[in-house]
Image (tube, helix red, strand yellow):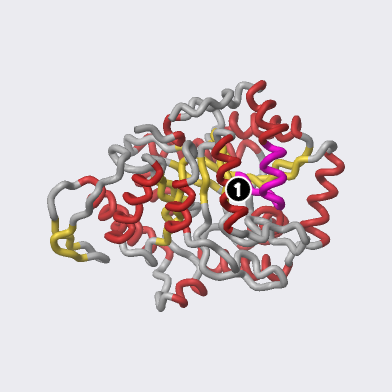
Amino acid sequence: MTNPLLDSPNKVKLGVMAFNCSHGSTVTNVDEAWAMTWDENMALARMADAAGMEALLPVGRWKGYGGQSNFNHRTFETLTWAAAVSAVTSYATIFSTVHAPVVHPVAAAKMAATIDHISGGRFALNLVAGWFQDEFDMFGLNLAPHDERYAYAAEWLTLVKRLWAEEAEFDFDGKYFQGKGLWSEPKPLQSPRPPIMNAGSSTTGHAFSAQHADMNFAMLRQKDEDSDRAQIVQLKQMAVDLGRTSQCWIHVYVVCRETEAEAQEYLHRYVVEQGDDVAVNNMIEIFGAQSATLSDEVLEAFKFHFKAGFGGYPLVGTAEQIVSGIERLSNMGVDGLLISWVDYLGECQQWIDEILPLMEQAGLREPFKNRL
């Protein structure tokens, strides 16, 4: 059983993210912002899958951020979403993003194994420790102190892994979870288990990812290439020091036009002229107060990038310029890109038509042949 996240021969792996959410990753009021319907989700999933992209990743979101756009207020739940998307695709790895405090590990282990069977062994888990108290209020939950969230997530994941692997019933008596006669069948198709991604960006988050995840979903600070490269090297070395390996994936927001001037003009229109400042200010406040991921100074400087693509890394310009940017990221140690656009369907097709061939010419990708 193979999974393209681990088996792909491509130097730079590709995925599409956040298209299960209204507005995707762009905090903007432009008319063409992603409305997010099921038919559009299916069309985009099939398009990316047929092009050989390795990953489809939904964002776990339960509540919007307010403002005129009420960014991300309409979302498809990610486990049920992944089951359905798995049934209409044949190659891409299908992720679910799970907030550990919201879904009990016994239920999560069973649901993940179910999706792994539906997908033929293409499921992956993006585990989130939790940071958005307004969402947790809907479940009657209180956010634990930052470092304790990762201790909780570690025990959660330990239990899930045992349920995926152990053939006999077992008892569990942890700090956060207790149970008798625990058992789950069928097991996932993938051996030893489905891949795991984590986006922890704090010191504690980095340590958790190094110990437990196969992919770190990193947020580059974008100060300069040397500091970003050092961050990636550190993340990978932390895993190596524990006798493990870890890929580094990042989120990129993309604006591709025939000329650089046209790309910058469109970026300015949807971010500066029609960006939702109320929603992004709410987002910044939540990140600063609850996530302990970025400093206040960094968050303030990142406002533009949050509106442009939820804090992602910019790939803006012509197709040639974008591929040059991808080469730089690859040389920095980035293994995979999770992409968002304003107009997912139209711009994903543009990526397939204009950027993928250039990536192949640059030796970043091989021509896709579905080997499954």
Estimate the x, y position of residue 272 in percent, counting from the top left: 80, 59
283 lies above or below 49: below
Quadrant the C terminus occupies: top left
Along the line of sight, which residue is nearer the eye, 314 or 243?
A: 314
Where does the magenta region start and end? 339-351
Estimate the x, y position of residue 92 in percent, counting from the top left: 49, 39
Horizontal arrangement in the rendering, residue 354 relative to residue 112 (left or right): right
- Residue drawn at (35%, 58%), measured in percent from left and top? 153
Dominant SS in magenta: helix
Horizontal arrangement in the rendering, residue 342 relative to residue 329 (left or right): right
Along the line of sight, which residue is nearer the eye, 356 or 35?
A: 35
Along the line of sight, which residue is nearer the eye, 79 or 62?
A: 79
Q: Secondary structure at mark 1?
A: helix
Q: Is residue 244 visible?
A: yes
In the picture, residue 100 is in which quadrant?
bottom left
299 lies above or below 116: below
Estimate the x, y position of residue 243 in percent, counting from the top left: 32, 35
Q: Which residue is mark 1?
A: 43
- Residue drawn at (30%, 61%), measured in percent from left and top? 107
61 lies above or below 210: below
Tell me which amino acid carries mark 1. Answer: Ala
Along the line of sight, which residue is nearer the eye, 90 or 204?
A: 90
The stretch drawn in magenta includes residue 89: no
